[in-house]
Image: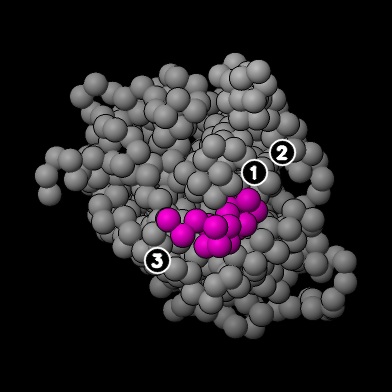
Amino acid sequence: MNNEEKRADSGGGLVRGMGLLQATSANMLEMIGIGPFITIPIILGAMGGPQAMLGWIFGAVIAICDGMVWAELGAAMPGTGGSYHYLREAYGPRSLGRLMSFLFIWQTVCTAPFSLASGAVGFANYTRYLLPEMNWWQGKLLAAAVCLVMTAILYRDIRSVGRLSVILWVVVLLTVGWVLAAGITNFDAARAFDFPSGAFKLGTPFFIGLGVASLNAIYDYGGYNNVCFFGGEVTNPGRNIPRAVLISIGAVAVMYMVMTVTIIGVVPWREAITEGTMANKAIVADFIQRLYGSKAATVMTLLILWTTAASIFAVMLGYSRVPYAAASEGRFFKPFAILHRTGNFPSFSLVFTGISAALCCWFELPTLITGLIVIQIVARDMAQAIAVVIIRRHRPDIALPFRMWLYPLPALIAFAGWIYILGTNGLRMLGIGAGLMVIGIVAWLAQSRRRAEWPFEQVAGQ
């Protein structure tokens, strides 16, 4: 491969140095972060029993369908920035697509710190198993420090990052493997399937609980699209991006479902949803302690902290590339286009993302998770499910190396799933998301007017 072939198609300086193994490991690192280790009690509590497994299943269906959308668009437009390119091309690169792509970047700059901070706050919460005397302020400072340390580790060229991803990924798989093996060999079906009375009674509480459980499941599955954000640094992207997306979803969905069932086959679910108990605060550590004692639980906690740090690493890798892609084309604030002189990575965007995440660590975990998912759905996911249909119908000039199976059913299911999750998780965060989009629209209109671009180009020409 010559030097020109190694260059990303949209960055003008990024290098295609991530193969399928590295891309898949980066995806799974983000997906298997702190999420399942802290949200299992939340998901169980949302539906009041092991019937909450329906949330995992429903979330997996949405993730698979949405993953098809990402796979098709990512293979067709494999530039760094992901949805920035997809939305711009689908909705018109010289018209509405400019607004849609700008709003995606705006949303990313606003929510990427939420995603990173949620992992860091989860890291601090699990650390309390090792340091029970740690207070609230110390926990927040630890979370902020984790974000800054990950920023420093990522401050290097993409080939080094790819090697680090694989090393971190191996340890993550060993951690999950231990949990699965321990759960399967000590599984008690009667405890795991101890359904409360009326567990499957259909009604408003059931469907609201399923929506809350599904939102947290989607948070845990989140990351299958990570490869699309640094697609300009992936080799053979038409083939490797779809594979990385779909392989990571399938593998992680199976892991999560088996993990949850086997854990509640050891730890009674009623204890897991009781606030103040160790099962509620650190369910996997409590799970291992019940089976093998406190020393083994300490080792597991350390492995979970490693897994969490690895996930933050992967999330920051992907999100730091998104504003760079737009800024390098003059479509976002100029500083985000700065590349490191020798490492050829977006240095300003990386540092900005890391510092913003450290500041967001002062929010509480449920606020971070709900805000992240709701705002992403409003500004990106629903628009993208429509975008894949628009491109199929109106952009025959865009080659599609990968076509989703059973088109357009996956896109329609994903869109319907997003509406359901929004409708069952309250209006406060939805209002915040809409407010952020209004501010973004105002900022974009001001930029377009200053540049005499659509929709002001006719006025400027008079």
Judge whether residue 354 is colored magenta.
Answer: no
Q: Disc 1 marks which amino acid? A: Ala
Circle on res. 402 = 3
**Is there any visible trace of residue 330 in the rendered image?**
yes
Circle on res. 379 = 1
Q: Which residues are magenta?
A: 381-397
Q: Quadrant of residue 272?
A: bottom right
Q: Is residue 297 left or right of residue 441?
A: left
Mark closer to the chain start, 3 or 2: 3
Q: Position of residue 381 (x, y in %)?
A: 61, 52
Residue beneath the point at 77% across and 63% down: 209
Q: Disc 2 marks which amino acid? A: Gly
Q: Is residue 133 above or below residue 286?
A: above
Q: Position of residue 376 (x, y in %)?
A: 62, 45
Q: Disc 2 marks which residue?
A: 433
Q: Is residue 156 left or right of residue 363?
A: left
Mark closer to the chain start, 2 or 1: 1
Residue beneath the point at 68% across and 58% down: 418
